[in-house]
Amino acid sequence: MNEQLQPLKKQPRAGKAARSGTQDDIVYAHIFEAILEQRLAPGTKLSEEALGEIFGVSRTIIRRALSRLAHEGVVLLRPNRGAVVASPSVEEARQVFLARRLVERAITELAVQHATAEQLAELRQMVNDERDSFSRGDRGAGIRLSGEFHLKLAEAAKNAPLISFQRSLVSQTSLIIAQYESGNRSHCSYDEHTQLIDAIEARDATLAVNLMMHHMDHIDSKLNLDEESASDDLHAVFSHLLQTKKPGRSSVKL
Amino acid sequence: MNEQLQPLKKQPRAGKAARSGTQDDIVYAHIFEAILEQRLAPGTKLSEEALGEIFGVSRTIIRRALSRLAHEGVVLLRPNRGAVVASPSVEEARQVFLARRLVERAITELAVQHATAEQLAELRQMVNDERDSFSRGDRGAGIRLSGEFHLKLAEAAKNAPLISFQRSLVSQTSLIIAQYESGNRSHCSYDEHTQLIDAIEARDATLAVNLMMHHMDHIDSKLNLDEESASDDLHAVFSHLLQTKKPGRSSVKL
DNA sequence: ACACGGCACATTGTACACAACCGCATGCGC
DNA sequence: GCGCATGCGGTTGTGTACAATGTGCCGTGT
C-alpha cells in the first residue's frame, strides 16, 4: 500500500511518454499511459491520496491531473465520490467514432493543404516508432504511438481547436480500443498510415480522405462493439468488482 | 479594491446566467458573463486573490473556474504569471470559425435525425428569449443566449463529444464577436434561428444544412476580420497596455 | 544619461490541515 | 427475520500558510 516511488523531483524521465514538463504533466502522462496499457482497468478507483503517495506529490497535483484526464474523457469524476477510470459504453464509443470520422476527414483535407516537408518527415518517423513497438510486442506503446500519429496529423492541419478536440478524441479512442479490441490483430496498421502520408505528400486530397475513411472503417471493424452491446451495461455496472491492483486473480468469486 | 460582495453562500442567484449549482459554476458563469458583456476587456489580468475577495471565496475556487475558462479558450493561463482574458487574434478567430462550420454542419444533420419535439420546443423558447434580450438592448445577454441556442442544438444531435467541443467553440465565438463585431447590427438574427428550427422539424436535412451554412456566412460577414488583419498581431502584442479596469480612458498615451 | 545588477514586492504554485460528505456496518425496533 | 436509523471510517472539498517565481524599482557604475 505504501510502496512509494522516488519523489520524482529530479527524475529526467527519459522513458516513454512522460514529457519533460511540470509535475502535472508527469503525473498525467503516467496515469494516462497506465490506463492505455490496461494496467488500470476501466472502473478502477483512482484515490487521490494513494496516487499522491505513489508519485510523491500532494493531492493538489493529483487533482489537477485527474481533472485534465476527466476533461479528455478517460477518467470519470464523480462529485464527492472520487475518480474512476472511464469505462465507455458502446453508445459512447459509437459517438466518439462518429465524431472522429468527422474530424479526421477535415484534418486530412487541411493537412493536404498545409503540411510541411518537416511535418511529413516527423510523421514518417512516428510510423517507424509505431512499427517498432508492435514488433517488440509492446501493445500499450503501440496504441499510444498510433494515437500520437493522428494527433501529429492534426497539428499539420494548423487549426488549434481541431487539435484540441482531436487530442480528446484520440485519448478516448485509445481507451475504447484497449477495452474492446478483439483478438490480437494490430489495431492500426502502419501500412495505412504510410499510404496516408504518401497521399498527403502528393497533395491528393481525394485519395487521402478516402484512405483515412477506410482507415477509420478498419479501426472500428476490429472492435466487437455490436456483440458486446447486450452485456455492456452489465460490464460497466460490475466493473468495480474487478479492481485488480495485481495482475492475475481478476475474477470475482461468485 | 476591497468592495466585497456577499459571500454568496445563500444567494439563490435568480438573475441571468448564474446556474444554481456549486460555487465553481457561479464564479465561472459570472466571469464568463462579464467577459461576454465586455465589462472585462481582452487582455485584462484576472488576479486570483482579487477575484476571491470579490466573490467571497478562496483562491481554490477561483483557480478552478479560471482553469475551466482556459479550457474553453476564453481565458489565457500563463504559468507563474496569472490569467488574462483571451484576446483572440484574427488567425485564431478564423480557425474557430472554420471548426465551427464543420461542427455545425454535422450537428445540423444529426439534429434533423434525432431532435425530439420537446427539444424543438425548447429551441423555440430560446429564440424568444434571445429576441427579448435584443429588444431590451441587452447585447451581452443576446450574445450569450444566441450561443446557448447553438449549444442546445448540439444537444439535440445526441453526441457527447460534439456537444463538449461545441461548448468550447461557442464560448470562443462569443468572445470573438464581442471583440470584433462591427457596428450595432444584431449579430445573430433570430429569424435565421427560427427558419432553422422549421427545417429541422420538417426533417429536411439539405435545407437545414444550407440554412446553417448561410447563418455561418452571415455571422462572420459581420465581423471585420479582414480589415484588421494587418494590425491584428500588433493588437495582440500591445493589448496588455490597454488594461482598463474602468471603462473610458482605454487609449495608450504615445 | 544609459545600461546593468540586485533587491523588494506582489502574485502564483504547492502542501497541508480542517470540514463536509458519502458509504458501510452495526444495532435497535418492529 | 427484516428494515431502518444511527454512528463511524474513510475520502473528497475547501481554506489557508508557506515557498517559489516573476516583475518592477532603485541604485550604482560606466
Image: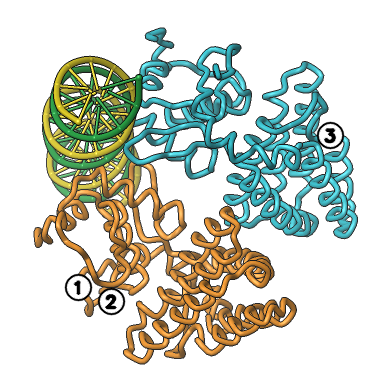
Chain colours: A orange, B cyan, C green, D yellow
Label 2, on which residue?
Answer: A251
**SS of the residue under disc 2:** loop
Label 3, on which residue?
Answer: B189
Label 1, on which residue?
Answer: A246
1 vs 3, front mark = 3
What x and y, as percent, mark residue A108?
Answer: 65, 71
Per the model, the C-alpha gap separating discs 1 and 3 is: 59 Å
Q: Kindly identify which chain the residue marked by label 3 belongs to.
A: B
What x and y, as percent, mark residue A39?
Answer: 28, 72
Tell me the kind of residue under disc 2: Ser
Q: Is residue A66 left or right of residue B250?
A: left
Tell me the kind of residue under disc 1: Lys
- Rendered residue at 70%/30% (across/down): B143
Report which quarter residue A225 is drawn in: bottom right
* Marks 3/2 same chain: no
Image marks 1 and 2: residues in contact by CB distance under 8 Å: no
Report which quarter residue B118 is drawn in: top right
Tell me the kind of residue under disc 3: Ser
Q: Is residue A123 left or right of residue A218?
A: left
Image marks 1 and 3: residues in contact by CB distance under 8 Å: no
The answer to which of B171 and A132 lies nearer the viewer is A132
The disc, 1 or 2, on the residue closer to the chain's N-terminal end is 1
Q: Residues within 10 Å of mark 3 (few under 14, many from 20)?
A: some
Q: Is residue C3 above or below residue A235?
A: above
Query: In which quadrant is the N terminus of chain A drawn?
Result: bottom left
- Rendered residue at 29%/64% (across/down): A18
Q: Kindly identify which chain the residue marked by label 2 belongs to.
A: A
The answer to which of B196 and A24 lies nearer the viewer is A24
What x and y, as percent, mark residue A153?
Answer: 55, 70
